[in-house]
Amino acid sequence: MQKKQSIVWLSSSYPRFEKDSASIFLRYLAETIDSKKYDVHVLSPDDYHVDHKQHSDTIFLHYFKYFAPRRLQKLAYGSGILPNLKENRLLYSQVPFFLISQFIACYRLVKKLKPSLIHAHWAFPQGTIASMVGKLTHTPVIITTHGGDAFALQGSILASIKHWSLKHCSAWTSNTSATANAFWGDIGKPYIIPMGIDYQQFSTGNGLTLRAQLADDCLVLLFVGRLVEKKGVKDLLRAYSLLNREQHQKTQLWIIGDGSEKRSLEKLSHSLQLNDYVTFLGKLPNEQLPDYFAAADIFIAPSITDSVGDTEGQGITLVEAMASSTAVISTNTGGICEVIEHDHTGIIVNPESPLELKVALQKLLENPELRHSMAEKGSEAAQKYSWVQVGVNFQELYECVQVDHI
């Protein structure tokens, strides 16, 4: 019988407890890795909310502490590291401790386990730390870039660090070509492997209970995501406010998520006199989302490039909406145009253009046949993002990198 191999994953966030949605896609990806071949050891930042009783026979969770007392560890999780730094500049004082602690924890774990490879998620800082540890321990390294690490952190020093990290790993992957193209220099050709979804789960959502209190002719508009600058929810509220009174009376806008901009978005909704039509539902457990997607008629992801250059690498909620047979509208940012085919599986508008967004909303609200056609085509297109296929792609890369390293 073939001996199982260990793989060390390095991440800046991972679900801290059973119902946590922090980087939930990493848990789903880890669960697709063949447990007969591999044990996955995930190293992620410690947090006050970590449940150390989480258990799996094949996915082992390790945490590094980087600040004391523990309750002050606020750099990771929540809205994400970059939005957290933007909201509270005092957190910059934790960055050096975070980097040093992650490096030491990674080095110790690799020396202890002697894994077949290190898989780092995000080029910086995880990719940099992984490449350094890989060189010190002669362990092959794969770096996966997700978007924020590509589009943000573009200062000359950080860009050079990311370039070094990708140049000195064994292989690197990107969720879209747009994300990959945001990196510069001679760093080798990436493997384009998108993040996936549970297609079965999202294609079988049931929205009847959620719609029970609504009028039969009410159309539900939906946003799901972190309430941070790059998600562009301010533009969605402004676009929605431009619809006429009759359209408001026949629609409801549901906003699911939490983040640093939630309070300002609620104030904007009030100032635009939208309180009767907009509901902020907060963060919901991931298992409830398929029913909300199923209940919706139109999903909107009005992403923008934020003030630090961050934008959407792939837009996984768009794929979830498409799998749910919900029509989608989004913007021409990051890798979104690789997910949506304009006027076929959805509508693409320019970012930071509430007027264009309003026109797209009107188009779908007034044309049910177009709405249903796009929803049907989107559902078909979403099938290629199944986690089963994504897991196979990563495992094939794991095996290829190990062979090359021999």
Image: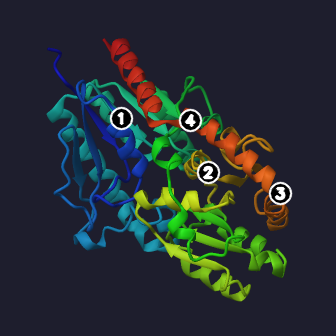
The numbered mark, 1 or 4, whose residue comes first in the sequence reads: 1
* Foreground label between 2 and 1: 1
Sooner in the amino-acid sequence: mark 4 or mark 3 = 3
Disc number placed over residue 367 in the picture, else none:
3
Rendered view: 200 above or below 250: above
Residue behind mark 1:
32
Q: Residue at x 53, y 36 (%)?
A: 385
Q: Amino acid at mark 1?
A: Thr
Q: Look at 22% across and 48% down and name the residue there.
A: 62
Residue marked by disc 2:
312
Q: Eyeballing the image, is 211 above or below 193?
A: below
Q: Earlier in the sequence, mark 2 or mark 3?
A: 2
Identity of the amino acid at label 3? Answer: Asn
Marks 1 and 4 sit apart, C-alpha to C-alpha, by: 16 Å
- Residue 6 location in percent, x, y? 22, 30
**Which element is circle 1 on?**
helix
Q: Are marks 2 and 3 in contact (CB under 8 Å)?
A: no
Q: Is residue 167 left or right of residue 297?
A: left
Image location of residue 343, percent across then percent down = 81, 44
The residue type indicated by label 4 comes to Gln
Sort mark 1 into few (<14), some (14-19) or many (20+) by Cα contacts within 10 Å: some
202 with respect to 301 (left or right): left
The residue where tag 4 is placed is 383
